[in-house]
Image (spheres, rainbow, N blue to C red):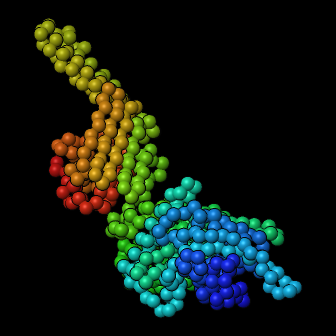
Amino acid sequence: MKPLHGQGEIIAGRYQIVTLLDQGGMARTYAAVDLRTHQRVALKVVSLQEAQNWKILERLELEAQVLANLNHPFIPNYLDYFQLDIEVNAAKSDCRFYLVQELVEGESLAALVKQGWHTTEAEVKDIAMQVLEILTYIHQLNPPIIHRDIKPQNIIRRADGKVYLVDFGAVQAVYNQTMGGSKTLVGTFGYMPVEQFQGQVHCASDLYSLGCTLIFLLTHRSPADLPQKQMKIDFRQRLNISDGFATWLERMSEPMLEKRLPSAIEALQQLEQPDLAPTICKPKGTHIKLTKTAQKITIKIPHYHHKRALKIFAKNCTILLLMIVVITLPLAVVITLPLAFVSFSFALIIGFIVFGLLFIQFRELRILLTRKFQLEIEADVFQIDIKEFLNNRHIQGHPQDLQVIDYGDYVCSLHYERQRVEIEPMSNYLTEVEKQWIHQEIINFMKKWDWFSQENIVEWQP
C-alpha cells in the first residue's frame, strides 16, 4: 500500500501529518498535529478508490459513531469525522474518509513482542485486569458493545504500563460481501472463538480473544500456531506460570461458550483471586437464582414445588399415616380397659403424639409451598429475608459479623449475633451439588473483602 499522505502535509487545513503509524486492511493511521489546538491526534483514513466495497467505509463510519458515544479514560477519545474529495492528478480523483481520535503515546502489544519484550506473569495479569475493566464498561452499556477484534495489535501500552483498547471498527461481527452474498468474518484468525466463525457473538467472545492475546504475550506465538488438545490451546507445557493463572487462562480461552467465563466482571473477580476460582458450576436445572457483581451477591431460594420436594413430602405423609395407624390400633384396645384413668391418660398421650406429628408435617408443608429465602451481601451490609405463611423474618447487619457454619462439605446455616439463620430445612430439598455451590459462592465472595478472616467460617461442632 502506497502512503496517501506525506510528512508535513496538512489535511482539511487543520491536521498536519507527522508520520505513518500503521497500515493494514484498507485503512492507514497517521500521527498528526491539530494546528488549532496543538494536540497530537491519530488520523485514520480510508480511500474510496482503494476500498474493495462499501462495507469498508461503513466500518469506519460505524467506528466513528461508536467512539462518539463512549466515555472511558482508556478508550481514545473521538474528535472528528469527515470526508474530502481529493484530486490525485489531472485525470484522477478520490474520495477519502477520515476519523480523528486522541493519540495514545505507546506501542501495541504486537510491536512490543516483535521488539523482544518478555513479560512476567504479574505484568500479564496487570494487562488483563486493565482490559477487563474496559470490557466491563462496554459490555454493560445498553445495548452492550462487543469489540470482536481484540488482539495484540489493538491493545496499546504506554511507557507507564497503562493500556488502551483501540479499533472499534469491528463491532458488527458479520456482514455480507457485495458480490456473491457470502459471509465475511470481521476478526482475526487465531483470536476468534468458534461462535464468531458461525456469525454468533457474545460478551464472552471478547474474553476468548483476550485470553488468546495473553497467551500470545506469554509464548510469543500466535494461538493458531500452538498445539491443541481436544480443540483447546495446549499452552501449559510451554509456560512457567502459576497453576491458578493457567487455569484462569484455560477458562478464558475455552472454545465451548457454555464452559467459558461468562462475563468480564466474573473474569476480573477470579483473576484477582485465582485460588478462589469456583470449581463447581451452577447446577443444571436448579431453582436457585444467584446473581453476582463486583460489589454484591444475591441468592434467592424459592418455595419448593419441584418434583424432588414433592416426593419427599409424599414420603413423609406416607410415614405419618402408617404411624397414626400403628398408634390408633393399641388405642382401640386400651379404651376397653376397666381403669378409666389409665385409659384416658394413655389416650391423651397418644393424642399429643399424633398432634405433634401433624404439626410437624404442617410446618413442612408450609415451608414446601410458601417459604422464600433471600440473602444479599455487600461490602458494608447484608440482608436476609425469610418469608413463609404466618412467619416472616428480616435480618440486617454488617457482613463482618456474619459467620458461615461449615458442615464439612457445604453450608447449612449462618450465624449473626447468636441468631441462627437456617438454610435447613430448605436444604432437605436441595441436592448436594446445590448445597456445595451455595457454600462455595458465599465463601468466595466474602473472601474478597479486607474485613474477612477465618473467624467468619466456623466449623460445626456436633
Q: In this view of the protein, which residue sits in the foreground, 199 or 46?
A: 46
Label total for image: 0
Image quadrant assignment for residue 16: bottom right
Q: Is residue 400 visible?
A: yes
Left or right, residue 383 beside residue 178: left
Question: Can you give x and y, in whole percent of width and height, for residue 144 in the image?
Answer: 56, 58
Q: In this view of the protein, which residue sits in the foreground, 314 or 421?
A: 421
Left or right, residue 212 beside residue 237: right
Q: Quadrant of the N terminus?
A: bottom right
Question: Can you give x and y, in whole percent of width and height, for residue 409 in the image?
Answer: 29, 55
Question: Can you give x and y, in whole percent of width and height, for residue 169 in the image?
Answer: 63, 70
Question: Can you give x and y, in whole percent of width and height, for residue 103 in the image?
Answer: 54, 78
Q: In the rendered image of this protein, does residue 229 appear above or below residue 365?
A: below
Tell which residue pokes out farthest to the front in this image: 36
Q: In this view of the protein, which residue sits in the foreground, 461 or 2?
A: 2
Q: In the rendered image of this protein, does residue 176 appear above or below residue 394?
A: below
* Residue at 16% across, 11% down: 344
Q: Is residue 152 visible?
A: no
Q: In the rendered image of this protein, does residue 53 appear above or below residue 2?
A: above
Image quadrant assignment for residue 269: bottom left
* Residue at 68% across, 74% down: 98
* Residue at 33% across, 65% down: 276
